[in-house]
Amino acid sequence: MKILLIKEVKELGIKYDIVDVKPGYAKNLLFPQKLAILFTDSLKTKYFNILNKNINNEKKLLNKFNKEIIKIKQLNWVFYKKASKSGFLYKTFSKKDIFNIFLEKKININIDQINFKKKGINKIGKFKFEVKFSKKIFKQFNIIIIPKPNK
């Protein structure tokens, strides 16, 4: 059975995806929870109009955030932090620290758009963090933590 997702469904797809599912799954779970509708011939025209509108919105978002991406790339992502001899930081470097840098540099990014694979960085080395601009638009950046030299 072909259905049109009207909300994101984990492990199945995102909003406006057309997917094939078993009729029982659609009728018992997706339709009652208003997560999907039956994809019929009459919906095809509406769907393609919605899809084109969605693509245009994504392009506008991408243009908007390209300016922010350029600003982020221009920043120096090398930091000197106090660390133990074994390389562990005395204070974890978190997404809040990155958000504060964005605020300071007037980069229009919300703290919820910043993602680390872990809760934060707690040792010296090279790491990646990600900035999500939308569900489909994200960019990874490298960050390097170097031990602060003792005085």
Image: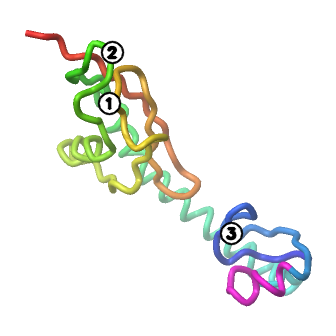
Residue type of the residue flagged with mark 2: Ser
| The N terminus lies in quadrant | bottom right
Q: Is residue 26 magenta?
A: yes
Neighbour tally class for label 1: few under 14, some 14-19, many 20 plus, Cα within 10 Å: few
Residue type of the residue flagged with mark 3: Val
Q: Residue at x 32, y 23 (%)?
A: 88
Q: CA distance from mark 2 to mark 3?
A: 44 Å
- Residue 101 x, y percent position in the rendering: 23, 41
What's drawn in magenta, residue-wise?
Answer: 25-36
Can you identify the residue that label 1 sits on?
Answer: 74
Horizontal side of residue 127 vs 105, given as left or right: right
User: Which badge, 2 or 3, comes first in the chain's sequence?
Assistant: 3
Q: Nearer the viewer, mark 2 or mark 3?
A: 2
The reply to whether discs 2 and 3 touch (Cβ–Cβ < 8 Å) is no
Q: Nearer the viewer, mark 1 or mark 2?
A: 2
- At mark 2, the secondary structure is loop
- At mark 3, the secondary structure is loop
Residue type of the residue flagged with mark 1: Gln
Q: Residue at x 29, y 23 (%)?
A: 78
Neighbour tally class for label 2: few under 14, some 14-19, many 20 plus, Cα within 10 Å: few
Can you identify the residue that label 3 sits on?
Answer: 9
User: Which badge, 1 or 2, comes first in the chain's sequence?
Assistant: 1
Residue 100, by quadrant, is: top left
> Extreme left residue here?
151
Total of numbered circles in the picture?
3
Image colouring? rainbow
Horizontal side of residue 91 vs 34, given as left or right: left
Can you identify the residue that label 2 sits on?
Answer: 86
